[in-house]
Amino acid sequence: MGIKNLLIVGCTTCGKSTLANVLCGKRTFDENESTIRNSRDFQEEKFFWKGIEYHVVDIRVVLDEKKILYKIGRVICSMPEGIRQVLFVVDQRLTAEESEKLKKIDDFILKIGIKEFTTIVRTKFENFKIVEKCKDDKDDFCQLNDKIFEHTRIIHVDNPPTHILKNDDDETIENNERKRIRSRNKLLNHLENVCSERYFKLKNWDKLVKSKHLKNLNRFNIENIDNLFEYNKLTRLSVSDYPKLTTLDCSTNGLTNLKISGCSRLKDITNLSKAPKLVSLSLIYCPNRTKLDCSSTEKLIELTVIELNCSNTSINILSVNLCPDIQRLNCSNNDKLINLDISNCKKLVFLDCSNSNLTSLDISNCKSLFGEYEQNGIKSKDFKYPPNLKIIRKIIAKNLIIVGRTGGGKSTLSNVLTGTTEFEENTIGVGDTKLSTKKVLYKRKKQKYLTCLKGSIFNIFEIGILEYVTIVRTKFSNFKNKNECDADKKQLHNENENIAKIVKSCRDVVYVDNPPTNIHIIDDDDLETINTNKKIRERSRKIILEYLDKECQMECFRLKTWDQIRNRLYRK
């Protein structure tokens, strides 16, 4: 019987290299908990089992149809005998985006006939020893991704880490090693049954990956937009990712909504006076644009600038809630102004709302204005307001919103934080949008309310909230080892430009490990695993809560439409 070539593919950090090591029974492949991969395109190793030689290849690519198809083609063509089995590694429910990409890949797979040589390996499945649990999970996959997983073999395993560096974790390492041995036996017995005598070999793979090309790249060379007057019926305009754009002329009578983002060289936004119907204006990631005079607009509800002068206007509702960087705001001499929202303007140092009809103003997050506000009626030069204005300072609650990809450990982190099991772990679904809340009272020096809100909000990095964001690296077995955490953080800073920008702009990166405790007990090993995992989760909880106690200060980020969204949710 010839060599059995195994090709392992999947998303980054899904456990491909770990699976390869478990199969080979040795530590050849680099198991890296980081999302960064600095090694060559693929790793390979050979081993013998029951007198049969196996050749394992681990592909390191992002789940992109063009890249993954090219790499698979390259690796398979490098195997003179052909391939016996593709092990497609999945560690969680697929997101909608991943599911769509896999459907495209599946179209190619069906055309070339490799599906019959494919096994889905469901990793990080703690109940892999229970047949009923595995069957239920397989049914869930087939319902959510019927085209991809229907009539495809699925096997469940759990390969927890054994490269833990702390000396007090010997018990955890031994328990994890036993699990990996069980997973290995299950995998090899499966391969013994499914690997036929036939090989799969490609012939015309290159033709399949040349079907798409990038188009419409002209925007990268545009420096000026000055012909909007030709589009008098234009009402909404989004100008996104024009790196060379320096000037935007807004001369169009019908424009009501304007969004500008990712225009790093933009300096001038001209002729806003010729856009009298403008009601919504947003500037995001335009660092060269620091001032904006909107004195001609009638109702402005969204703005992201440093300095705003809208005095002597007829604006009746003004919200700069989405302007966390604004420092100076002049909305004086406007007797129609009745509603002003500065609830998220922690950098605001100057506010003039004198000669307006404001009756109350919440300055809870504007610490600089507190120093300027005086109860005796003597007005500061940096905070000017109507004589009967009621200043509001609300009791601060520490609201946390936990976001991330499906299967990333959001619900588990919520349970660890609250010390409960109120959040359902291992929830099923692609892009789940149901919200669940759990309030927990955490006492440390003084009482603090912590409201945990879990949801699938994927555009969180587009609304100026990065300085309120903490990246929580879950499933990081060496979370107690500072050197390992620092090394991983350094790698994150060296990631691609977008990820590096997020990491550098957010508040910090915190490392935890929250292994499962909802394991069905069928033997003493399972009981020991649960007790060990509970201890690890307690350590993680302490790390997170101590971090939040220090970092969650008075300032809050609050969306303009927060109350409206909340009311709609509660009515439902």
Image (spheres, rainbow, N blue to C red):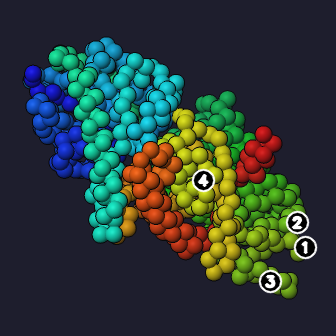
Give how far across and how far down residue 295 sits, in percent: 72, 55
**Viewed as shown, does residue 508 lie left or right of 494?**
right
Mark 1 crowdedness (10 Å alpha carbons): few <14, some 14-19, many ≥20:
few
Q: Nearer the viewer, residue 342 or 230?
A: 342
Q: Which residue is mark 2?
A: 359
Kindly indicate the quadrant of the structure image that contains residue 365.
bottom right
Q: Which residue is mark 1?
A: 388
Q: Which mark is residue 374?
A: 3
Q: Which SS class for mark 1?
A: loop
Quick check: 289 above or below 195?
below
Whether label 2 touches label 1, CB < 8 Å: yes
**Count of number-bearing discs:** 4
Q: Nearer the viewer, residue 148 or 376?
A: 148
* Mark pair 2, 3: CA separation: 17 Å
The mark nearer the N terminus, 3 or 1, is 3
**Viewed as shown, does residue 27 lie left or right of 383?**
left
Residue flagged by tag 1: what amino acid is it? Asn
Q: Can residue 410 be seen at all in this image of the molecule?
A: no
Quick check: 379 above or below 328?
below
Q: Nearer the viewer, residue 265 or 494?
A: 494
* Mark pair 2, 1: CA separation: 7 Å
Mark 4 crowdedness (10 Å alpha carbons): few <14, some 14-19, many ≥20:
some
Residue positioned 16% across, 28% down in the render: 5
